[in-house]
Amino acid sequence: MKILLLMTAAALFFIAALSGCDAKKEPSGVICGGVTDNTDRKAPKTIVSKDITAFSASMYLLGRWSGPDENMLYDFEIIKNEDGKLFACEKTTGIKAGADKTLLSGLQKVIDDEKLAEQNGLWRVTAGLPPEFQEISFSAEYASGEMLRFTCNNDPFADWPKRIYLVFADWFAGRGIGDLLVPKNDGPVKSVSLEVGSGEMFTEIRSVRVREENAKSGETLLLEKNVFDGSAKKNSSKRICFPADYYKRISEILAGYDLRAFDRSSVLYGLGRDLKDDNDKNAPGVVLHIEYENGDRLLIEAKDKKDTELLKPVTDALLEYYASIFG
């Protein structure tokens, strides 16, 4: 009997260890390993005031957003200091600066755009989930006395935490504090290829290695432009030597656009966009592959009609340049 009791106790201890939840560490009222719902269902779902007087938000973001580490918890706060003035801080990095209307209005825009007031009063948490679904909280206090608060499990695919993060990141960067800024590569380009489809027209720009007998001016690495016209059932192809300032010009063009939200390898991919048509084979498409001299790569493969339109300024600029060098 003693052996059976010892085996039972050991089994219970092992199961508790696997649950990933220590009851002693749980806050009061939280059910270990279960769902806790303390939602205030009477909380207003509309906030009239737009004047934020205090703010806090925590979020767990997948990927690399700052520094060398990936998958980080960030904790933002705006409170009054001893002098009664508002200052903003991020607790993970330890950065802080005096808050202003630019920051507050930027945060309010996200609150409005993402309809966060509809979550007011929510307090529903499932314990024992992986880090990317851990408990997070949001709070905004207003000059009118109104309050917007909710606590829930982190959603790594939601847009509002990313947008809140970027408001703070850009605002801090404007004050010379770049700790949170998602890196945007404006450095020199090493290689680039482009494919643009529009209706029955398809244009392709790429570099090709040719045989010695097909070399131009002794160069075997050439720049090639292919145009396919489906309506006229006509194709054209032309090869030229790379202009001396080719990569300098390409680097200057690309530096004028922020393409991170379209880069499939970026943490910002898809931000603020519905990607349900992303694999529409009948939609005009854009394929843009860029490799920078520092080894960074940017991969854009947009099949969504909306994305193609959003990318039109940069593709137009590139096609205009290519038209000038191919003649």
Image (cartoon, grey):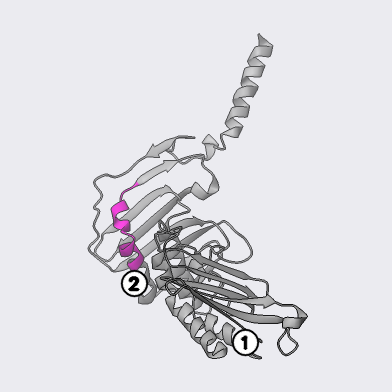
- Where residue 44 appears, as percent x and y from the top left, is 24, 52
Residue drawn at x 63%, y 23% as measured from the top left: 11
- Alpha carbons under labels 2 and 1: distance apart: 42 Å
Query: Label 1: few (<14), some or many (≥20) within 10 Å?
Result: some
Q: Farthest top residue?
A: 1
Residue type at mark 1 is: Tyr
Residue type at mark 2 is: Ser
Taking the magenta stretch, the answer to whether it contains residue 216 is: no
- Where residue 61 appears, as percent x and y from the top left, is 51, 57
Asked if the residue under mark 1 is in contact with the one under mark 2, i.e. CB atoms within 8 Å, the reply is no
Res 77 seen here: no
- Where residue 299 appears, as percent x and y from the top left, is 57, 67
Looking at the rendered image, the disc whose residue lies closer to the viewer, 2 or 1, is 1
Question: Disc 2 designates what residue?
Answer: 105
Secondary element under disc 2, as helix, strand or loop, is: helix
- Where residue 210 appears, as percent x and y from the top left, is 72, 77
Secondary element under disc 1, as helix, strand or loop, is: helix
Residue 1 as seen in the image, left or right of residue 161:
right
Q: Earlier in the sequence, mark 2 or mark 1?
A: 2
Residue drawn at x 64%, y 77% as measured from the top left: 207
The quadrant of the image that shows the N terminus is: top right
Res 285 seen here: yes
Residue 236 is tagged as: none
Query: Label 2: few (<14), some or many (≥20) within 10 Å?
Result: some
Q: Main secondary structure of the magenta part?
A: helix
Above or below, 5 against 143 in this view is above
Taking the magenta stretch, the answer to whether it contains residue 121 is: yes
Residue drawn at x 47%, y 56% as measured from the top left: 59
Above or below, 186 against 144 in this view is below
Q: Tell me which segment is drawn in magenta.
A: 109-122
Question: Disc 1 designates what residue?
Answer: 246
